[in-house]
Image (cartoon, rainbow, N blue to C red):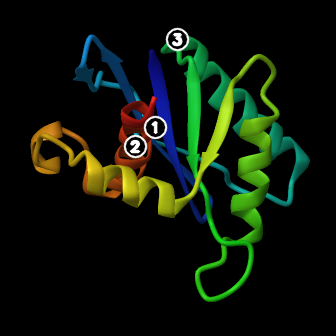
Amino acid sequence: MKACGVELKGNDAVICVMSKSMGLYDIPQVRVPRITIDNAGNTEDLQKFQFTFAKFLEDYQIDKVVIKGRALKGKFAGGAIGFKLEAAIQLIEGIDAEILSATMIKSTIAKSPVPIDFRDTGLKKFQETAFQTVFAYLESN
């Protein structure tokens, strides 16, 4: 199974693709580490973001999209743009998307620690949360 972990930060959807087969994990090289929207208030830009994300998923034959959930209110609540991007991703036709809570991600990683140091993955530092999200999903299934 090939899954894509997503962390929504501001106008960016930070992504990490990972697959698991027979207990082995693979992190393939992808052409972009994040997909950005210029103006989330513009319908055309939102549709362009959704099209770009859908094309990315199609090109890399992603089976599952896993989005790190954010608080709806309080100090660490997600911003309005993030929720728009989340909806745009979830509404891509033919995509199986799921939101994982931060608590679930932390507890899964505590039970099954990542077997490799993040610096050795070849990913950028800003992709670490997306990496943890997809790892937790694959480890729990």
Residue 79 vs 21, above or below: the answer is below
Percent across and percent down for residue 118 are: 17, 49
User: Mark 2: few, some, or many residues within 10 Å (few <14, many ≥20)?
Assistant: many
Identified by mark 1, the residue type is: Tyr
In the image, farthest residue toward the right: 43
Calculate the distance from the C-alpha at mark 1 to the C-alpha at mark 2.
4 Å
The residue beneath circle 1 is 137
User: Mark 1: few, some, or many residues within 10 Å (few <14, many ≥20)?
Assistant: many
Identified by mark 3, the residue type is: Gln
Calculate the distance from the C-alpha at mark 3 to the C-alpha at mark 1.
17 Å
Identified by mark 2, the residue type is: Ala
The residue beneath circle 2 is 136
Front position among marks 2 and 3: 2
Q: Nearer the viewer, residue 36 or 86?
A: 86
Percent across and percent down for residue 43 are: 90, 47
- Horizontal side, residue 141 vs residue 86: left or right: left
User: Mark 3: few, some, or many residues within 10 Å (few <14, many ≥20)?
Assistant: few
Percent across and percent down for residue 75 are: 61, 88
The residue beneath circle 3 is 61
